[in-house]
Amino acid sequence: MPKIIDALHRDHANLAKLLAALERQVAAFDRGERPDYDILHGVIDYCLNYPDLYHHPKEDLVMERLRARDPAAAATFGDLMAEHARLGEVTRRFAAAVHNVLQEVEVPRAIFGETARTFLKAYREHMAVEERAFLPLAAKTLTEADWREIDARVAPRPDPLFEGEPEERFSALRKDILAWDREHRELD
């Protein structure tokens, strides 16, 4: 399996953990409890930066090579770059909703919850398509030379939340994810 495919799978698995952490906070909000805004900020900060600046550009490079190698196969996924831009917009809308709540702007619970659920759904559906169809097709279709070219164009960047010691801005989110993982491993 090419290194970049492994890295993209790992990013998706990590994003799934992050989305689960967000979902727990949204559930608390729906119950009328105060969510942990440090966790919400961590999710937003991460999604505004890491996926848009590092993860999606890797996928875009893979799509570019797939389009060159097999245009018909690549066409079955539509415009991946436009989908990445749409995810960015959904993320910015959710970030604005959180910002408004923190600034004590009147935001109905239903509107905030719907914005959060739209964000969660968009990311999960996007990753599901990539995991189920896009990445397997790329792994099967692209050549070793294609992967070398992609690797040469990808600037290495450690994940600021999941690799090594997390950046301070992600500490509450990282603690929540690790506690959840530990709790669920003990239940298995």
Image (spheres, rainbow, N blue to C red):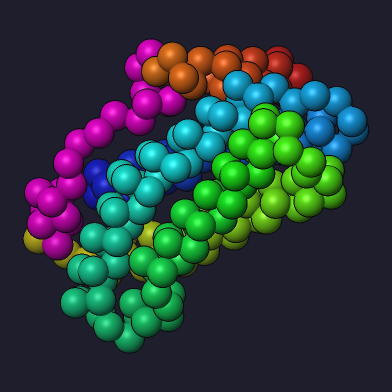
- Vertical order, 25 against 144 (above or below): above
The picture quadrant where one finds residue 39 is: top right
Kindly give the residue lying farthest to the right in the view shown: 31
151 and 186: which is toward the camera: 151
Query: How would you classify the magenta stretch by its main secondary structure?
Result: loop
Q: Residue at x 34, y 77 (%)?
A: 74
Q: Residue at x 53, y 20 (%)?
A: 174
- Vertical order, 167 against 131 (above or below): above
The reply to whether residue 167 is in sight is yes
Residue 7 counted in the magenta span: no
- Vertical order, 27 against 186 (above or below): below
Which residues make up the magenta segment? 146-165
161 and 5: which is toward the camera: 161
As drawn, is 11 to the left or to the right of 127? left
As drawn, is 136 to the left or to the right of 101? left
Residue 155 counted in the magenta span: yes
Q: Residue at x 25, y 76 (%)?
A: 67
Kindly give the residue lying farthest to the bottom in the view shown: 72
Residue 120 screen position, x and y as percent: 64, 49
The reply to whether residue 128 is in sight is no
Residue 3 screen position, x and y as percent: 25, 44
As drawn, is 22 to the left or to the right of 47? right
135 and 42: which is toward the camera: 42
Residue 62 screen position, x and y as percent: 26, 61
Residue 7 screen position, x and y as percent: 33, 42
Please state, as top left, top right, bottom left or bottom right, where the C terminus lies in the image.
top right
Q: Residue at x 46, y 66 (%)?
A: 83
